[in-house]
Amino acid sequence: MDVQEINDLFELLTGEQNSQTYYNFINLSMYEVSVMLRSQECSTDYRLNFLCAAIAFYRVQQMLAARERAAVTYAGKMLKESQNTAYEYSKLLLRDYLQICNDLLKCQNFVFSSFSGEEDIT
């Protein structure tokens, strides 16, 4: 896994200009991917950079969705009922990259890959 490439891909996914702000998320995603790998020889596969960036993007969207749960209105704060579309798309993107890297991952029942339909990723 190439940290600079992951940073570049993360910036592409998020639209952020400075991935260093979210370095902890990127670092966590690299750890998560290293735990999922079938063997350490796979760690140089280019696809893993995309998977790390997608996981980091998903984690950032989780954080932002939690923050944006309350909307400021004229009458005060109230919960938003609509879904965070960036969060929903980050889940779909993550699922796609997990499928692309499927042959590199050791466990088919990893927590991210065991969802379908309307289930939440946990």
Image (spheres, helix red, strand yellow):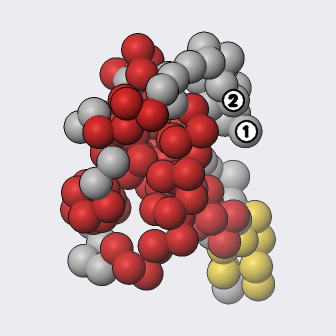
Assess whether mark 2 and mark 1 are in contact (beta carbons under 8 angstroms): yes
Front one among 119 and 94: 94
Report helix, strand or loop for mark 1: loop
Residue at the spot 46% in from the left edge and 73% down from the top edge: 22
- The three-letter amino acid code for the residue at tag 1 is Thr
Q: Which mark is residue 122?
A: 1
Q: Residue at x 60, y 39 (%)?
A: 35
Secondary structure under tag 2 reads: loop
Structural crowding at the residue carrying mark 1, measured as other residues with C-alpha within 10 Å and reported as few (<14), some (14–19) or many (≥20): few
Which residue is drawn at the image coordinates 54% and 71% (left, top)?
24
Q: Earlier in the sequence, mark 1 or mark 2?
A: 2
The vertical placement of 102 against 91, above or below, is above
What crowding class fits label 2: few (fewer than 14 Cα within 10 Å), some (14-19), or many (20 or more)?
Answer: few
In this figure, which residue is indicated by the disc labeled 2?
A: 111
Type of amino acid under label 2: Val
Residue 76 is drawn in which quadrant?
bottom right
Q: In this orientation, does residue 107 appear?
A: yes
Residue 60 in view (yes/no): no
Q: Position of residue 15 (x, y in %)?
A: 27, 66
